[in-house]
Amino acid sequence: MENKIELRDIKLRFGSKEVLKGINMDIPKNSVVALIGPSGCGKSSLLRSINRMHDMTTNAHVTGSIKLDGKEVLGNDVEPTLVRRKIGMVFQRPNPFPKSIFNNIAYGLKINEMAKNGEVKKIVESSLRDCYLWDELSDNLNRSAMEMSGGQQQRLCIARTIAVKPEVILMDEPCSALDPISTAKIEELIIRLKEHYTIVIVTHNMQQAIRTADYTGFMYLGELIEFDKTEKIFNNPKEELTKRYVEGNFG
């Protein structure tokens, strides 16, 4: 299977504190990859390394190689904003802009000059449709996004991400603040979106990894202990540490 992202010897330090200790991972194209492991093991830090969000932290230092479609992402000659346009991110808590529903989706298109006015409406509609929001919201696009439910806001944030046509979507515990019904809708959406995108999701919910992910990586203390097909990680892991974690005999 063709790899969309290739990570080689990724190390991350915040000042003198080592957070990631040489991560190697191949993320196949049009797949969902879940990162699991206890809190503080480096999952979110790895996610933020992939689209260079650590560039915004003064004492963060990332080394190694991250390639997107065979092209280096970490090079000094690579513009981080262009990386983030190709590698979008959805955060743990919904973060809609204090704007209308329509302008939340249209904002990225306008500031990046990615669409003319006539095209913006079409892209807003298609993005909302892709996230199962059009039928719920089509009559209220001028309503403030801040008035939506948490589950709707998170799907809106995903719609805002895909409107600018990234190639990869990173999701950092996207369901942790949501109720079970909203979580089920997001999981259904994740499975559907992999037809067009490569998705990496950090989750503490192992059942969520089983339901949504094609591949799963187990991380512990800044290291990738094991990475394999999800079915194998949960049913027949190679590493004893992985086995203990997925069976709940950990700590």
Image (tube, rainbow, N blue to C red):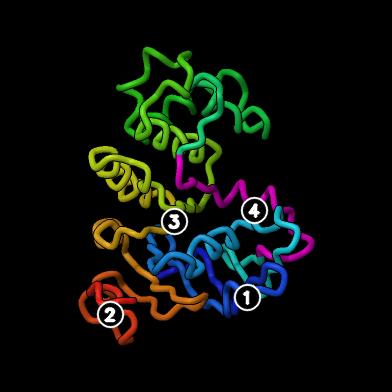
Q: Residue at x 45, y 67 (%)?
A: 27
Residue designated by label 1: 18
- Mark number displayed over residue 244: 2
Badge 3 amino acid: Thr
Mark 4, secondary structure of its residue: helix
Residues shaded magenta: 73-93
Foreground mark, 4 or 1, reads 1
Residue designated by label 4: 83
Mark 2, secondary structure of its residue: helix
Q: Residue at x 55, y 28 (%)?
A: 97
User: Can the viewer see residue 5?
Assistant: yes
Give yes or no for contact between labels 3 and 1 (Cβ–Cβ under 8 Å): no
Badge 4 amino acid: Val
Badge 1 amino acid: Glu
Q: Residues within 10 Å of mark 3 (few under 14, many from 20)?
A: many
Q: Earlier in the sequence, mark 4 or mark 1?
A: 1
Give yes or no for contact between labels 4 and 2 (Cβ–Cβ under 8 Å): no
Foreground mark, 3 or 1, reads 1
In the image, residue 174 above or below residue 202: above
Q: Residue at x 30, y 22 (%)?
A: 135
Q: Is residue 78 magenta?
A: yes
- Mark number displayed over residue 157: none
Q: Position of residue 189 (x, y in %)?
A: 32, 43
User: Can the viewer see residue 119?
Assistant: no
Q: Earlier in the sequence, mark 1 or mark 2?
A: 1
Query: Label 3 to label 1, Cα distance in Å?
Result: 28 Å
Q: Quadrant of the N terminus?
A: bottom left
Q: Is residue 103 magenta?
A: no
Residue designated by label 3: 198
In the image, residue 82 above or below residue 18: above
Badge 2 amino acid: Arg
Mark 1, secondary structure of its residue: strand
